[in-house]
Amino acid sequence: MKKYIILILLTCSFSVFSQEKIQNDDLTGLRAIGSPANPKVKMAWNHYNDYAMITKFCQDLAKAYPDLVKLESMGKSYQGKEMWVLTISDTKTGNVARKPGFYIDGNIHSNEIQGTEVAMYTAWYLAENFASVPFIKQLLQDKVFYITPTINPDAREDFLKNPNNANSPRSGMMAMDDDGDGQADEDKYDDLDGDGNIVMMRRRSATGRWKVDPENPQRMIPVKADEKGDYEMLGYEGIDNDGDGLINEDVIGYYDPNRDWAWNWQPDYVQRGALFYPGTLPETQNIKNFIMTHPNIAGAQSYHNNGGMFLRGPGAEEDAPFYSTQDASVYDYFGKIGEKMNPGYKYFVIYKDLYTVYGGEIDWLALGRGIFTFSTELMTSYKLFNKNSEEGRFQNNEFEEFSRLMLFGDAYVTWKPFKHPQYGDIEIGGSKKNYVRAHPGFLLEEDAHRNMAFTILHASQMPKLDVLEIKQKALAGGFTEVTATIVNEKVIPTHSAHDVKYKIERPDFITLKNATVVAGMIVENEDTNLTKEQINNPQTIAVPSIPGMGVVKVRWIVKGKSDKFTVEIDSKKGGLVSKTL
Amino acid sequence: MKKLFLLSGLLSISLWTSAQNSYQNHTQLSARIKALSSKFTSTVTLQSIGKSKGNRDIWALAISKGNASNKPAIAIIAGVEGTHLAGTELAVQMAEKLAGASTDSIAKLLDSKTFYFIPSVNPDAQEQFFAKLKFERGGNETETDDDRDGYVNEDSFEDLNGDGIITQIRVEDPTGSFIISKEDPRVMIKADPAKGEKGKYILLTEGTDNDKDGSFNEDAIGGVNIDKNMTYDYPIFVAGAGDFAASENETKALLSFLYKANNIFAVLTFGPANNLTEAIKFDRSKTAKRIITGLLEKDASVGEQISKLYNTQTALKDAPALPQTKGNFSQTAYFHAGRYSFTSPGWWAPKVQVAKDSTKKEVATLAKPSDNEEIKYLKWADSQKLSNVFVNWQSVKHPDFVGKNVEVGGIAPYSKMNPPVSYLTESANKHLKFVSALASQMPELQIVNVNAESVSAGLTRISIKVINTGLLPTYAEIGDKVRWVQKVKTELKLTGNQAIVSGKKINLRSTLGAGETQEYSWLISGSGSISIEAGCATTGVKTVNVSLK
């Protein structure tokens, strides 16, 4: 009897247990290493997302992970779209607003679309792996991410939904008079054959200097100096809409949202694409307000395309002196690891290795606000065949070959005849807008992950402060000397050297609580007793910065004794930490 | 009843006159500007171009007959530098005189030109003039941590002698680098070791070192100075300049107004800089780089022309050398917005020549006026018997200098740049004369030598010359670089069966100098009359009609 009962109980409990057990796919072989097996928010990372899809993704993620993800708008775009920003952190641990913050945005240039997907992937990955990857859990306990998938939602929508080429619009949607005729955006590209693509126009010509590549009928190549050609190239698909004798001379925009920022801003005649003053665009204003009201942001990442580059500032050579050796070494640390994390990507300095940019976003973040910032040019031709071509883009045929072998010709519009109102009999064809600059689908998820990993490396090295030690020493006259050692366990200092020089952010405050402080000082060298006194408000010592992987020591002279001293570190970028003896 | 009328009449007159006798705060100024616009409804249009951080309207007056934005314009801007109330008063007086002018040549100008007045761009700062504690404030109401130490406004001024104004303190101290001037014992000057002088005094602004950081009054109330917040040569991380260029509403409002009003040919800013009594020289090395930091060659010669005009029209002399300052509006208007940009304080203390002791022999000779701006100013104030411009040095007890001889005194805040309002009437007249003369030299486009000849039946060759008959170029040379400045456009307007066989419909060209011509010709097929328009926003558009042969 007893035996039976036990058996029944066992069976019951077993059956109850087995009925209630929810299978965790992450604990089975379903989980591919590094990816959630059964994410709450189901996403495919092999396509691009329009505004409605981005909005839904943000809402779904916030709903699925209410303790981790908060969705807000940082303001409206020029056309009135919300600029979504996801705040991602473990809200159950610490005060989110005081954690070191990492800002991510993408798509400032509307045609550089995949930054949005990389930013979304990052948000998704962080939320979906919080429970299963201890490193991510710790990261979200310590830090907060602010992720804005697109900061140019208006023109992104135009790029995705309307006929465009890989380079248009790039601008925002504010109409401008590009050709000085008093009309704005009156001679745009025209999708002549109505296939949704803006491709190239060519015309047979006895005097043309182009020919069809005999190896690849899709490809046009210039003829040799002494060779006779049979085609002339007529530019992108379009007609002379306004009858001024020019074709496609006043397209959408044109201005450059990445020349609208308040560091070494220059007018349009110096820096093409600039507007009236830094922050002419509502999108720029919104981001600036967001950054200014989140002084905890210590690191930032902006996604562009293309070329496979981890870029740091400055954009202009004359700003090079603002990057001290100390600050450059922090960037070098990330850049060098980045080159390993993402084969084919190179760590570069904008003005030196790319071109001059005045009034760019990352210069404002890095030099205007003292935030360690990278911008990444996503996608490189290295990814096609996992090697760099030895020839330049116009000599090699790797994109055509990749389309033929891997995409079965999907990347190109085959040349077809068209009767053009100005040019007569022409042919139109060429690469689709989502080719060359944007990733083909199957490469998108991989590159999103690699770039996210680089960003997480960067974010994980934002300051982490701790009170390493509080020492007491009795002095004559009933005073006690209290010395605290403050450590920064990460690579990024609480203030860049540039920040310290120009006092961009206030100093870090280190306060001794539960004590009657009569004097306070920074200990410059404990062994030789070199100190620097702070006369006013000695209880709260102001230190200019807590260096990366380094320490600062502060000392107070206290009346009497105590065994309950509390040391509090209050750093805008390093967070709020306190320890009681 | 009659009595009442009389009384109310008297009251309004006295209000008007009192308004003319002192500087005005924003409320008074707003009322005065509104009164002006409602008095001259047909010529004056009032608009708020934005609000200051302290929620005060930034007023813009457009004075013109008819459609103001369609006419070439001059903009008079003042009060960007908040300590300069004289400029604001001058601008408003000029607007009043211009709007009120009825019969003379000035009134005639309003037929063809527009005059914009933005008299107070930084009203928050100007309000400090009227506050209980008077100190020279350049900043708006944005809260700023001027010394970037994490504490906001923690080291303001203190009125140590209780006179309601902030002057200076001098502390007798062996480490001081100042001495009392021999020329005028009221004035402190820097000791010059080359002349064998040794410093005796520390000179500071009136107040205490509240936060004991060794600096005095380095973080007082008062936020961003709009005249340091503009885009050209913006001073990074300088107290009062803001966190970044164009961070302030006032800055954005003024720049947006200027950029959008592409009919503005020239800007005259009243403020603490002067490029009018002496023109800026052309310096090729400053124009040869990607970032241009000097006037372009043709603009420099226009600068000379206008400087001569200013000196003859205003007959003002002995102007102080006031170089342009970083991040100011005047330079931004030229280098970034591409307009001719002139600036003057509008008023400064004239030099006073003091006769030497008449008991001595050299009675006839006059003493050389001092080079020291403060001494020059005080001599002038003495000659005018102005009171309240100098606070005599008086001893006070100072907590930071216990046991030391500390005195409060010095020139009263605002007074050097802002004389009693009665002194400004003459200056307003002179500057209106200058602005009128400038307006009458402005470019004027004509389409001349219009020729239509038949090439063959139904085919006509039209040729024209576009000439600038004004005395100044159609716009500044730098305007040709600036995308937002409208270029000189000549356009054919076709109708019916007309078609262009040769030539362009729209022809854009760079600025046309005074007397310069541009020739165009077209082959047109078809019949009837064709119209040709030529002009740009800073000249207005002229039209001719030509019959096709």
Image (cartoon, coloured by chain):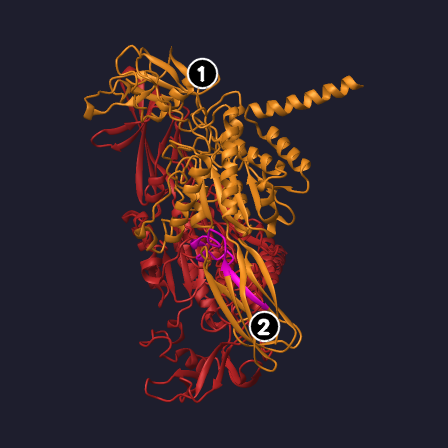
Chain colours: A red, B orange
Amino acid at the residue labelled 2? Asn
Q: If the image is split into quadrants, where does the C terminus of chain A sit?
A: top left
Give the crowd class for mark 1: few <14, some 14-19, many >=20 residues within 10 Å. few
Q: Which amino acid does label 1 sit on?
A: Lys
Instruction: Please identify the quadrant where the N terminus of chain A is shown.
Output: bottom right
What residue is shown at x 65% (from left), y 42% (from top)? B43
* Mark 2 burial class by Cα count in 10 Å: few <14, some 14-19, many 20+: some
Q: Which of A413 and A461 is in front in this view?
A: A413
Is-magenta flag for residue B482? yes
Give the chain of mark 2.
Answer: A
Q: Which residue is label 1 attached to? A: B385
Specify start and end residues of the magenta stretch as a single range.
B467-492
Residue at the right extreme, as displayed: B1
Task: Tell me if I can see residue B401 in this picture.
Answer: yes
- In-front residue for pair A37/B177: B177
Label 2 belongs to which residue? A241
Q: Is residue B32 left or right of residue A545?
A: right
Which sits in the foreground, A145 or A107?
A: A107
Q: Which of A96 and B97 is in front in this view?
A: B97
The answer to whether residue A94 shows anywhere in this view is no
Q: In which quarter of the image is residue A13?
A: bottom right
Q: Distance between the residues labelled 1 and 2?
A: 73 Å
Determine the residue positioned at 44% across, 30% down. Answer: B151
Same chain for labels 1 and 2? Say yes or no.
no
The subunit carrying tag 1 is B
Q: Provide residue A483's location: percent of width, then percent of height.
A: 31, 29
Q: Is residue A218 above or below residue A125?
A: below
In the rendered picture of this protein, how many numbered marks are placed on residues? 2
Residue B192 rendering spot, x and y as whole percentages: 23, 25
Q: Is residue A242 left or right of residue B190?
A: right
Which residue sits at x=30%, y=42%? A550
